[in-house]
Image: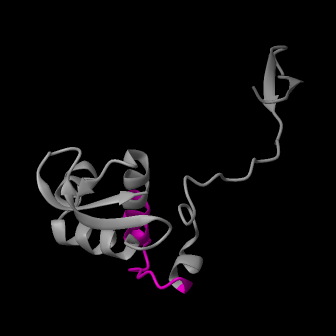
Amino acid sequence: MPDTKSRQVSIGLVRPVATELPRPERASIAPGVGQDMESNAQAGHESKGDGSSLSVLNQVRALIIRLSPEPICDDCVTEKLNLSSREFANQKTRELAGLNGFERRRDICSLCFREKLVNRRI
């Protein structure tokens, strides 16, 4: 609950007034998640200027981390994140492959139970 002071209003009622408290630093889900657009652009990630591409990459990364160590296929990534196309999910999962313990391999998806190319964090 924020630190409050009391202020009297002209009709005699007391109304609490919130004082400005220092903001805590932002925590990140995983390395790279929540980075600003400039640092992601320097890391070689593409951007449309509106941050949507970076946002999707971070959503894909967070989903795979949340399910780890269980694998997820590109079709299920597309469905869970409501992406417009499977190719977009495929592009983002290929960007993550080989980075920070992310891998792509042929295995059974933990959501649809079909054998296909899946993504996971080990």
User: What is the x, y in percent for residue 120?
Assistant: 35, 58
What residue do we see at 23% from left, 45% from top?
Answer: 110
Q: What stretch is highlighted in magenta?
A: 42-59
Q: Is residue 88 left or right of residue 24?
A: left
**Which picture quadrant has residue 55?**
bottom left
User: What is the x, y in percent for residue 28?
Assistant: 60, 55
- Up-down relation of residue 45 to residue 61 (above or below): below
**Which picture quadrant has residue 31?**
bottom right
Q: In this view, does 91 lie to the left or right of 26?
A: left
User: What is the x, y in percent for residue 64?
Assistant: 37, 54
- Up-down relation of residue 120 to residue 21 (above or below): below
* Colour setting: one colour
Looking at the rendering, in which quadrant would you find the N terminus? top right
What residue do we see at 33% from left, 47% from top?
Answer: 70
What residue do we see at 18% from left, 72% from top?
Answer: 87
Count of numbered circles on the image: 0
Residue 80 drawn in magenta = no
Q: Is residue 23 left or right of residue 7?
A: left
Looking at the rendering, in which quadrant would you find the C terminus? bottom left
- Which is more toward the observer, 62 or 49? 62
What residue do we see at 39% from left, 71% from top?
Answer: 96
User: What is the x, y in percent for residue 40?
Assistant: 53, 77
Residue 48 drawn in magenta = yes
Q: Residue furthest top?
A: 12
